Image: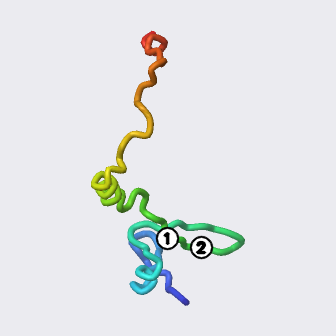
Amino acid sequence: MEISVINIGNSKGIRLPKMILEKYSISNKIELIMESGYFILKAKPEPRKNWEASFKLMHENGDDQLLMDDVFEDENFQEWSQ
């Protein structure tokens, strides 16, 4: 696919067709990889996307319990107070 380089203020850029953006789930950011004389554009997934819904489902299923205690019985807090 050939894409034109366009002026954007004092810079230059490219426009990606909507079809490409949707097909590769590109929203706000992409990763640009420069390798052996090529530019590779890679969709950058959004970290923690949909975590809220997952945590809500975990809570509803009772899967959000601690796997171990916050404080161990033999833990000594004196060494941290100095």
Which quadrant, please, contains the C terminus?
top left
- x then y, percent, for residue 4: 50, 85
Q: How many marks?
A: 2
Q: Residues within 10 Å of mark 2 (few under 14, many from 20)?
A: few
Q: Is residue 70 above or below residue 54?
A: above
Distance, label 1 to label 2, CA atoms, is: 10 Å
Asked which secondary structure carries label 1, the reply is strand
What amino acid is at disc 2?
Ile
Give residue 20's quadrant in the image. Answer: bottom left
Comparing labels 1 and 2, the label whose residue is closer to the camera: 1
Q: Quadrant of residue 70?
A: top left
Quarter that holds the N terminus:
bottom right
**Placement of 21 over or under 76, stated as above or below:** below
Q: Nearer the viewer, residue 3 or 8?
A: 3
Q: Residue furthest right?
A: 36
Task: Please state the horizontal and vertical placement of residue 25, each as a whole percent of the image.
Answer: 43, 75
- Above-or-below relation of 75 to 57: above
The disc placed on residue 3 is: none
What is the crowding at mark 1: few (fewer than 14 residues within 10 Å), some, or many (at least 20)? Answer: some
The residue drawn where x is 61% and y is 73% is: 39
Q: Residue 52 at what x, y percent from top left?
A: 31, 56
In this image, 53 relative to 21: left or right?
A: left
Percent position of residue 75, x then y: 47, 19
Report the residue at 31% width, 60% height from top.
53
- Which three-letter amino acid code belongs to the residue tagged 1? Ala
Q: Nearer the viewer, residue 41 or 10?
A: 41
Residue 74 shown left or right of residue 33 in the figure = left
In the displayed structure, does residue 81 sit left or right of residue 31?
left
Residue shown at the point (45%, 20%) measured from the top left: 73
Residue matched to label 1: 43
Q: Indicate which disc residue 40 carries.
A: 2
Image vertical order of residue 54 relative to residue 14, above or below: above
